[in-house]
Amino acid sequence: MSKVIAFVAALLIVVSPVSAGAVAQTRPEFPADVRVPRFEPAGRGRLVVALGDLQRARHIAVVVPGSDVDVRRFGSLLAMARAVHSAAGRDDVAVVAWLGYDTPEGLGIDAATGGLARAGAVELASFLRELPAAHVSVLCHSYGTVVCASADLSGVGDVVLTGSPGVRASSVAELRTGARVWAARSSGDWTGWVPKVRVGDLGHGADPVAPEFGARAFPAGDGSHDEYYRVGGVALAEIVRVVVGDAR
């Protein structure tokens, strides 16, 4: 088990019904390059983990997750952030795993409507405003793309939308950002079959990978919905190029 995984495991111990003594006995040595700007165990929880030094970074990436992530199921989000940070391989890059909102559970009504996204968008915008001056990329996956598209992303340099079910905006021009907007969907992603319609608050509307939306497309390979951040994958390489400012 790596030190980063052990670090998050220690946080999960805190929200488990064990004694303070047991926590103290199992708490590992924390990696020097891992920081936790926010940890709230109540309810489904809030957890923000930063890999790298936010104060010194020239490039900061914030990973915004989709459904089925909470403090007890943080591993998938952490793995995405770790993949970006490792692939970048630079001391001037910091990556944040941001669980700052209640994600939908499964594919029920919350995943098909915008209530959680609107609430999450407020939290995301607030977090972004507190970041140090740097080139900031917001990396949004699945329902996280709905959150990002609903947020005020002023001051962000790049927005990456992967595996989107729709973004509740008809074009890049309707988003509240001057950032470059990138979008991709792998050929094996089931969101390609989701109807891109919206009736009232049901459905998420326009597909960000459609040419008429106006996002910058990049290749994502043939992986599944959960494989955009697969180590060695086509999509991850493209995402990292955006994060370090090399994508054009």
Image: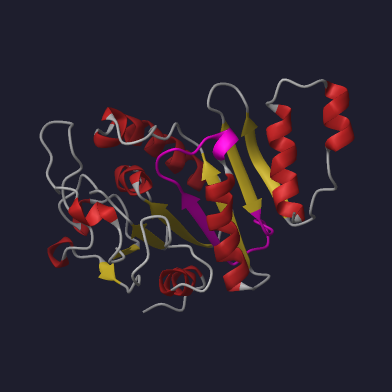
Quadrant of the frame with the N terminus? bottom right
Q: Quadrant of residue 27?
A: top right
From the top left corner, tell me how far across and down residue 90 is, in percent. 65, 73
Using residue 21 as the reference point, say whether residue 89 is left or right of it.
Answer: left
From the top left corner, tell me how far across and down residue 4 is, in percent. 72, 53
Residue at image point 49% right, 52% down: 63
Quadrant of the frame with the C terminus? bottom left
Assess whether residue 139 is covered by the magenta stretch: no
The correct choice, above or below, for 128 with respect to 55 in the image is: above
Q: Quadrant of residue 247?
A: bottom left
Using residue 43 as the reference point, say whether residue 188 is left or right of it.
Answer: left
Regarding residue 155, the answer to whether it shows in the image is no
Residue at image point 39% right, 32% down: 105
Residue at image point 82% right, 20% down: 19
Tally of numbered discs: 0
Residue closer to the observer: 112 or 133: 112
From the top left corner, tell me how far across and down residue 82 is, in percent. 60, 59
**Residues drawn in magenta:** 51-73
Residue at image point 10% right, 35% down: 199
Q: Quadrant of residue 72?
A: top right
